[in-house]
Image (spheres, rainbow, N blue to C red):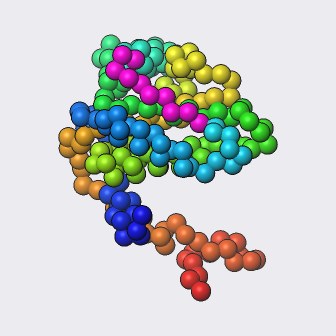
Amino acid sequence: MEQKHLATLLAARQTILPKRLVAPGPDAQQLAALLGAAAHAPDHGCLLPWRLVRVPPAARAALGAAFAQALAERDPGATPEQRAQAREKAERAPLLLLLVVDGACGDPAIPWDERVLSAGCAVQNILLTATAQGFGSALTSGKALQSAPLRTLLGLAPGQQALCCISIGTVQSRKAARLRPAAADYVVTLVPGKGMQPGWDNA
């Protein structure tokens, strides 16, 4: 991809809340491209330490029930309306994926943080591909992903953890793009004896 096209794509990516993502979602060919993009993430040791769990329409009710049960266990005082809102989160967006990271598979010398980093790169590939296809996307997380009801629903083994939901669909409405930080806000230079210092040296 030419540099100018990549820069345009990166600038176009924006989080669109799942409630603003509507049908149509990706067709079979587009879905295959989205999922295939994840395979190009860096993966130390070729562990493939993450899984993408597609949640089809027939499974949304079960996921919603897990969300509602997780809320009830976390907050016994949650109102019926709050439980309904938790359940409804599973019904948003035409395409819904769950990201699961496995901290136990493969070489035990490869730490959890490297596995999560690989998963994060896979997700970014998916988000950029969705943007290139003209769809909106969002990452969402929350305490329900760490709950016993969700672990039971997914059949997670010890060492496996659901980290986030990925929602993709047609943008119904969007807010103005947020102001992105400048490189000077997050790039520093290592100076021996002084540690990290603001700015960078282009020499």
Image coords of residue 66 (percent x, y): 45, 16
Residue 182, placed above or below residue 145: below
Depth check, front residue: 155 or 147: 155
Q: Say which residue appears at 30% left-offset and 31% top-offset.
A: 94
Quadrant (top left, top right, bottom left, bottom right) of the N terminus: bottom left
Depth check, front residue: 193 or 110: 110
Depth check, front residue: 124 or 184: 124
Q: Residue furthest left?
A: 172
Image coords of residue 147 (percent x, y): 54, 22
Q: Residue furthest front?
A: 29
Location of residue 18 by image quarter: top left
Q: What segment carries the magenta color?
A: 50-59
Horizontal relation, residue 171 to residue 147: left or right: left
Look at the image and tell me whether residue 169 can be seen: yes
How many numbered circles does the render carry? 0
Q: Say which residue appears at 63% left-offset and 39% top-offset.
A: 48
Horizontal relation, residue 115 to residue 29: left or right: right
Q: Residue furthest bottom?
A: 203
Quadrant (top left, top right, bottom left, bottom right) of the C terminus: bottom right
Q: Say which residue appears at 35% left-offset and 59% top-offset.
A: 9
Image coords of residue 192 (percent x, y): 74, 77
Residue 100, placed above or below residue 189: above
Q: Say which residue appears at 44% left-offset and 28% top-offset.
A: 54
Look at the image and tell me whether residue 85 can be seen: no
Image coords of residue 8 (percent x, y): 34, 64
Location of residue 28 by image quarter: top left
Q: Is residue 58 magenta?
A: yes
Location of residue 105 by image quarter: top right
